[in-house]
Image (tube, rainbow, N blue to C red):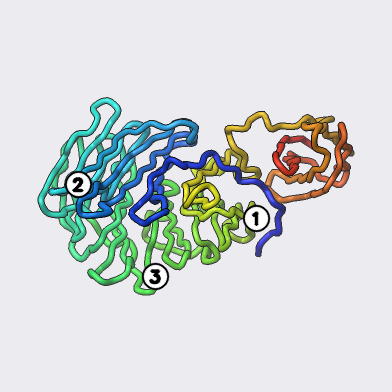
Amino acid sequence: MTSKMGFTQWMPVDTLSWWPYSCDFGIHAPLYAQVISEDTIWCYYSIGKCSPSGDSRNAIIKTSDSFHSYSTAYSFGNIAGPVILDISFSNNNTFFLYTRDFNYNLYKWSTSTGLTIIKSDYNSWLYDIQIIEDNTGFAISSWGVLYKYENDSLDSLTYIPNCFAPILKASNSDRHFIICKDSANGNYNTLLKSMDDGLTWSLAFHDNNRSFQNLTALNDSSFLLTTQTREVLKSIDGGVTWLPIMDLSNLILYSIVNENVVFGIKQGGIVVKTIDGGATWINLQTISSSINSINMVNEMTGYIFGNNNSNGPGAPMVYKTTNGGIQFVPESTPNNTISLFPNPASNFIYIENPDRTVTNYTVTISNNQGQQVLKLNVDIDSKKQIDVSHLNSGLYVLQLQNQNTIYVSKFIK
């Protein structure tokens, strides 16, 4: 069931018009982003050589203020390479980088030491990296050799047979998981677990009818496992038993916050949200940009990354919410608020016109679940009375929109 909702605004935090072009003429390179906290995001691009005599281009960039400003942590480009194969961001100040040039190299970068090499080999020897903290993590080869990273040293830990193209799902505890194929050409139908910090591994779950995609830890004993068909399974006993709890097959992209709250993107760029485990869905807004990913930090704050052809050919765009999707507004326009009174309200509220050069507005009121409860087209000279007597008690968001600007304020009924 889908709850029909009004139009709310996802406003861009920034358009990255300076983002470089790939070898495809007129197309910006993909934006790969890793959200660390509510304001800190790592992003990078990796562009191979466009011609035998050309340069590869790679850069890792960080923003600590929601894309209002940027700093380049590291960049490189030359005829020989290198090309970024994998990257793992552990926190605000550290990332690990697996590259290919003449050799295959694993690097560590930190704000204090810069770029240092951990291991180099002529042969490709890593398939996935997951660094948990600055000095703890794992790396694994495509055929199941597991390495433990600790105190700036990477050492072979164990070999996991019949584990192909593995995807690491490590945690801060001694309990870790690996999603892998049981044959080189098979599906991701095997979930392995370790209870002793990676020393030994056992089968947690195998299903020939499913292909696993991702694992989300709710706590030390509860996990969510998503499949390629967007089915969500839950375990509350440390991965011993799994039961289906949610169907996300109507979503193209999604971000799971917990077993009840999921944000997603439907066909046509429709942004949706559920707060009851998928029983009902709230339509938040339609975004015209080509959306690449959605990443919620928590129930209130998150980002959408996409590309907008109206701002140059495929320039990356970034959107942010700080109130759970009820209203998506740019941090760069904090003064777009309106004066309304009385607050708290009883039967009526009065809105003052924030721009006397404009009189035609659309008024939209949504409750604290993001559901539209009132929409009016009004003419405002100096102020306008709005009847709210029919609204239930609670917190509401009022949006006042003209042709050029959106104004937002909150009131209590």
Give the tally of numbered discs: 3
In the visual, does 374 lie left or right of 404? right
Which residue appears at 24% of the width and 30% of the height? 114
In the visual, does 142 lie left or right of 23? left
Which residue appears at 16% of the width and 56% of the height? 159
- The amino acid pointed to by label 2 is Ile
- The amino acid pointed to by label 3 is Arg
For the C terminus, the quadrant is top right
Q: Is residue 81 visible?
A: yes
Which residue appears at 36% of the width and 35% of the height? 91
Residue 252: % across, % down? 50, 61
- Toward the bottom, the furthest residue is 209
Labels 1, 2: front one: 2
Q: Quarter of the image holding residue 123? A: bottom left
Q: Which residue is mark 3?
A: 210
Which residue appears at 29% of the width and 59% of the height? 192
Q: Note whether 280 is above or below 176 in the view shown.
A: below
- Judging from the image, what secondary structure is the residue with disc 2 in? loop
In the visual, does 117 lie left or right of 330? left
Along the viewing direction, whichever of 398 and 347 lies nearer the viewer: 398
Residue 305: % across, % down? 48, 48
Q: Quarter of the image holding residue 301? A: top right
Could you say which disc has been placed on residue 282 in the image? 1
Along the viewing direction, whichever of 389 and 170 lies nearer the viewer: 389
Along the viewing direction, whichever of 331 and 178 lies nearer the viewer: 331
Cβ atoms under marks 3 and 1 closer than 8 Å: no
Q: Which residue is mark 2?
A: 79
- Classify 10 Å Cα crowding around label 3: few (below 14), some (14-19), many (20 and above): some
Labels 3, 1: front one: 1
